[in-house]
Image (spheres, grey):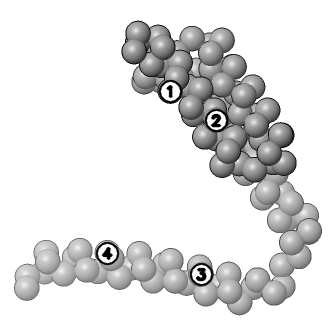
Amino acid sequence: MTGGEHAGYLVLLAAAAATFVWRALGAVLVGRVDPEGPVVRWFTLTSYALLAALVVRLVALPTGSLAGIPLAIRLAAVAVTLGVWWLSRRRVLPAVLSGSACIVAAALWLAGG
């Protein structure tokens, strides 16, 4: 094997080592972190805010094939998604599937199929 062939293995080994270091550190610290503490709450709320911003971005300023769906239909799909989420006692999978089905049905209807 030449030096160039070893480079790929070294990159893979470095990536695995970096992953395992953080996993080990997490396993060691998991007992010391308060799940209701302010740091965990901040990360939780920040992740919800980022997800909400992504959804708003996809609905308000879509790209690709989603841009061909009118805003009213995209907003209706969001309303259906939230309604199913609420009616299913905050279960995400049925809500996402129903919203996705609305978008797919609208795309097929707009395409005349």
Q: In the image, residue 60 lies at what x, y percent?
A: 63, 20
Residue at 86%, 72% in the rendered image: 35
Towards the viewer: 44 or 109: 109
Residue at 57%, 34% in the rendered image: 100
Q: Secondary structure at mark 2?
A: helix
Which mark sits nearer the N-terminus, 1 or 3? Answer: 3
Towards the viewer: 6 or 97: 97
Question: Which amino acid, by three-letter code, is at mark 2?
Answer: Ser
Q: In the image, residue 36 lies at what x, y percent?
A: 92, 68
Label 2 Cα crowd, 10 Å radius (few <14 / some 14-19 / many 20+): some
From the image, state whether disc 1 or disc 4 is nearer to you.
Answer: 1
> Mark 3 and mark 4: span between their CA atoms?
18 Å
Read off the residue under disc 3.
Answer: 23
From the image, state whether disc 3 or disc 4 is nearer to you.
Answer: 3
> Mark 4 and mark 2: span between their CA atoms?
42 Å
Q: Which mark is residue 11?
A: 4
Residue at 72%, 28% in the rendered image: 80
